[in-house]
Amino acid sequence: MAKINQGKNYIDDIREEDLVREVEAGRLRAQVSFDGVEKLDVLIIAVPTPLDKNLVPDLQYVRHVTEELARHLRPGQLVSLESTTYPGTTEEVMRPILERSGLKADRDFFLAHSPERVDPGNKRWQTKNTAKVVGGVGPSSLEVALTFYGSVLESVVPISSAKAAEMVKVFENTFRAVNIALVNELALLCDRMGLNVWEVLDAAFTKPFGIMPFYPGPGVGGHCIPLDPHYLEWKAREYNFRTRFIALAGEVNRAMPEFVRTKALRILNEQGLAPSRSHILVLGLAYKKDISDWRESPAIEVIKLLQHDGAEVSYHDPYIPVFKHEGLDLESIELGDEALRAADLVIITTDHSSLDYARVVREAKHVLDTKNATKAVPNREGKVTLL
């Protein structure tokens, strides 16, 4: 909060000069209390929607914010939920809480769901020029929400209900999760068959129709793909429906860090090294290249698995200098030639653009590349093992 009010940016996709301009002009201010909420016309909720250890949706943050807003709600306000959640949350969870205020949705105040669509690190598609899906709990709520979002965004897409809008977002993320699982499973099969999965995929994606590029990796990360499909899986049980693709995709994707561990141990064994006598350097802790977001990053699980095997594990990530979470306490090491030479194995888990992969391949004893980041490096055969 203090950083925002001082115009100090900590979000990768926000330009500092834009933040400073809005703060200095008095158009942006951060606070932690709900004081003054009744003076606002539009209230957007964008809070975490995690899962518990049993993959059950945890709506505590949505409920808490909604309960607080209900104490300040006044006629004419628009409340819009942007957090990804299961279909029915806005109507079945939020609406009853807000109506405890004595005000009625779609008559006294307006309630909508408009899922966020953000692709961290994407320079082309950002919030302003990405179509915004909007659904209301009634016609008046939809009209007001469309008017608001249409005033600041280039394109808004009206949809029949908040429930339908919620389904749109979980389907988008489920689509990605299932297709990522498909290519991850293909990678597992290609490993058994002695085929290069990257070669297979690159050739397949030359087809100009009927296919869309997805690539394998050490797992899936971020706050969307590993979590959101399970919101739909959980909700489907209410209708006595089993979402088999979602369950299977989750199993395949969650198993990928273990597969990376297996390939790493295989490489060490070929060198005559036991894990307990090995030093492994992991390149990349972020779940996606060129960002600092480590949430649900498969690299974290890879490190834990290798440490459990007794290996000494260090990491380098230009975007995450220190990592003290998830039971780990590590600092990013400098990626000098000596550090590369000292490692018995270098594992590329995030393909950050700023890294010199030719130097990594040249200096390292051996590289396990889970992202095909070394694709353009000449003469990598014998030095690089691909996922």
Image: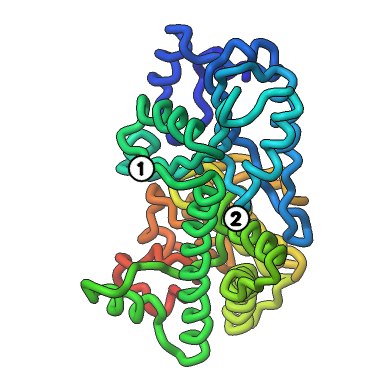
Task: Tell me if residue 303 can be seen.
Answer: no
Q: Looking at numbered disc 1 in the image, what kind of residue is underneath it?
A: Ala
Residue 171, placed above or below residue 366: above
Query: In the figure, 323 relative to 204: above or below?
Result: above
Q: Position of residue 285 (x, y in %)?
A: 57, 52
Q: Which label is found at residue 131?
A: 1
Left or right position of 152 against 226: left
Quadrant housing residue 131 = top left
Q: CA distance from mark 2 to mark 1?
A: 20 Å
* Residue 209 appears in the figure: yes
Which mark, residue 294?
none
The residue type indicated by label 2 comes to Asp
- What residue is drawn where x is 38% and y is 50%? 353
* Mark carried by residue 228: 2
Foreground residue among 31 and 382: 31
Above or below, 338 relative to 76: below
Residue beneath the point at 78% across and 58% down? 53
Residue at 57% of width from left, 79% of height from top?
Answer: 267
Instruction: Name which quarter of the figure residue 221 lies in.
Output: bottom right
Residue appearing at x 38%, y 75% in the figure: 198
Query: Along the line of sight, which residue is nearer the eye, 352 or 109?
Result: 109
Front in this rendered view, residue 280 or 321: 321
